[in-house]
Image (spheres, rainbow, N blue to C red):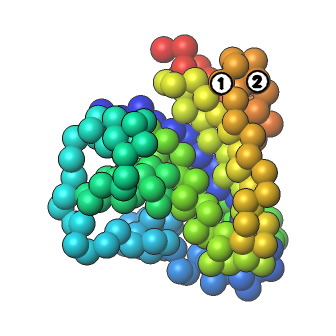
């Protein structure tokens, strides 16, 4: 069973561009289908090694392996798509789309980077918390390029970042998961 990484993916820009993105990334049963953002190559389908093997290869700086987990880790930032039940689209204000989602073990920063490159007129920001491993961060993109990255592991800094990016109420719930 994976340790879940909690993510807020916010996109800002013209409503027409946001609607185009929304339609492009929606898939069967999910408002955000990673395969619609960047499809896993067909030749890698079904080639899923033990996740520990993938993590070990990544820590050792091994070249990209020829399996779907390694490809996804390199291109999506995580080895599996977001848990479908966890994907929630919030469209509460003009010019903003916000997706809340959970991914296994790590943040989908590759998905955010791909969306930023495909829709360079949009501002893209991904905030994430991995409570089991005690880290959080925010990565921002403008003009299709990464413009900032703030990651932290120190508990007080994690609390501040999560409160700022997820809101006080949600931060209290998410950080309580860390205590369990």
135 vs 14, left or right, is: left
Q: Badge 1, how many Cα within 10 Å: few under 14, some, many 20+?
A: some
**Which of the 4 image quarters holds residue 46?**
bottom left
Q: Is residue 82 above or below residue 42?
A: above
- For this orientation, the residue located farthest to the left is 46
> Tag on residue 86?
none
Question: Residue 147, how many percent across, how many down?
Answer: 79, 57
Residue drawn at (61%, 70%) of the image: 115
Q: Are marks 1 and 2 in contact (CB under 8 Å)?
A: yes
> Tag on residue 157?
2
Q: Nearer the viewer, residue 30 or 127?
A: 127
| Residue 173 in view here | no
89 vs 65, left or right, is: right
Residue drawn at (79%, 27%) of the image: 160
Quarter of the picture holding the N terminus: top left
**Which of the 4 image quarters holds residue 163?**
top right
- For this orientation, the residue located farthest to the top is 179
Secondary structure of residue under mark 2: helix
5 vs 112, left or right, is: left
Question: Residue 98, how many percent across, how many down?
Answer: 67, 59
Q: Is residue 149 above or below residue 41?
A: above
Residue drawn at (59%, 20%) of the image: 176
Question: Residue 139, how many percent across, how many down?
Answer: 71, 50
Question: Residue 74, how many percent across, how many down?
Answer: 45, 56
Residue drawn at (78%, 78%) of the image: 121
Secondary structure of residue under mark 1: loop
Q: Which residue is mark 1?
A: 153
Marks 1 and 2, how far apart at CA: 7 Å
């Amino acid at each position: 069973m994976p340790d879940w990484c909690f993510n807020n993916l916010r996109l800002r820009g013209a409503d027409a561009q946001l609607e185009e993105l929304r339609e492009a990334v929606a898939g069967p049963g999910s408002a955000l289908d990673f395969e619609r953002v960047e499809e896993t190559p067909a030749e890698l389908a079904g080639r899923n090694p033990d996740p520990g093997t993938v993590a070990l290869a990544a820590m050792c700086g091994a070249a990209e392996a020829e399996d779907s987990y390694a490809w996804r880790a390199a291109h999506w930032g995580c080895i599996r798509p977001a848990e479908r039940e966890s994907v929630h689209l919030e469209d509460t204000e003009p010019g903003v789309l916000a997706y809340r989602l959970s991914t296994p073990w790590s943040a989908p920063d590759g998905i955010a980077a791909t969306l930023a490159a495909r829709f360079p007129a949009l501002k893209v920001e991904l905030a994430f918390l991995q409570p089991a491993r005690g880290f959080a961060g925010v990565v921002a993109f403008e003009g299709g390029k990464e413009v900032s990255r703030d990651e932290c592991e120190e508990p007080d800094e994690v609390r501040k970042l999560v409160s700022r990016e997820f809101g006080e109420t949600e931060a209290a719930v998410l950080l309580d998961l860390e205590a369990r």
